[in-house]
Image (cartoon, grey):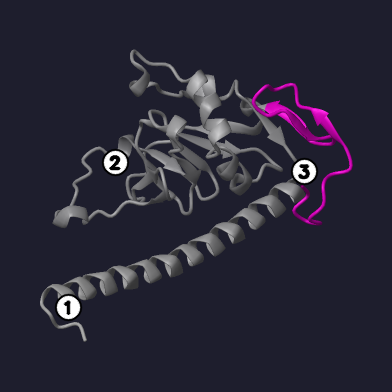
Amino acid sequence: MDVRTGRPYSAYKDSGVEWLGKVPEHWEMRRNGWLFSERSETGYGSLPILEVSLHKGVGIRDMEAGGRKQMMTERDCYKRAKKGDIAYNTMRMWQGAVGVVPADGLVSPAYVVLKPVDRIGSDYYGHLFRTDAYKRVVRNYSRGIVSDRDRLYWDNFKRIMSVVPSIVEQTAIAHFLDHANHRISRHRAAVKHEIDLLHEYRTRLIADVVTGKLD
């Protein structure tokens, strides 16, 4: 479906990629090495530390977490990630540990930083890389001694095929998904509040009944 019109695209084609199937006829297929270059820049120790979460993507690490300040003694060995890059955890990319970098910062040497080429929208690919279908592909390209320690290095990541809509469509799709996620989060919060109220009512009801206080 074209999110700009709410209607299906006029024509589709076989992508030639098993996990993807049919795509809009005018979309291209490219290996990731055509869409991104690896950013491997060190020596920017004054930047904040970033981390990748399975659920929230990339964010600034809380240096006071746990009530004690984490001392980063090797900050100059950490990689610089610039706003708009994509960063992923090599050991957990297959689980969805990837996201768009929200601000300039540093990531662990165990992460890979992707610099998008022109006309590649990071927000769109941030969503694509977290889909279940893409995570299965990533698992197939990851290598390790045991499966739970599989890592996706740049040399394998750049070989993976990805779909390439126009930059206008990439932007529209990313905006559509961001809005949908915000709406879902808002409804989830409302439902959680209702559930909390029901739990509170049940607790109070049980207490009143067992103590003979229910009228």
Q: Which residues are magenta?
A: 1-30
Mark 2 Cα-neighbour bin, 10 Å: few <14, some 14–19, many ≥20: many
Asked whether the residues under the numbered discs 3 and 2 touch, taking CB atoms below 8 Å apart as contact, a structural biologist would say no
Q: Which residue is mark 1?
A: 208
- Secondary structure at badge 2 equals helix
Q: Which comes sooner in the sequence, label 3 or label 2?
A: 2
Residue 122: x percent and y percent? 60, 45
* Magenta-drawn stretch contains 127: no
Q: How many marks?
A: 3
Residue 149 shows up from this direction:
yes
Q: Earlier in the sequence, mark 1 or mark 2?
A: 2
Q: Which image quarter: residue 177?
A: bottom right
Farthest residue to the left: give it.
211
Seen in the picture, residue 173 relative to 208 is either above or below; the reply is above
Q: Find residue 57 and report its horizontal and vertical position in percent.
A: 45, 47
Report the residue that reaches farthest toward the top. 145
Three-letter amino acid code at the position of disc 2: Arg
Which is more foreground, mark 1 or mark 2?
A: 1
Q: Which residue is the extreme one toward the right?
A: 10
Q: Is residue 155 visible?
A: no
Q: Is residue 26 depicted above or below 2 in this figure?
A: above
What label sits on residue 166 in the rendered view? 3
Q: Which mark is residue 75?
A: 2
Question: Disc 3 or disc 2, which is closer to the eye?
Answer: 3
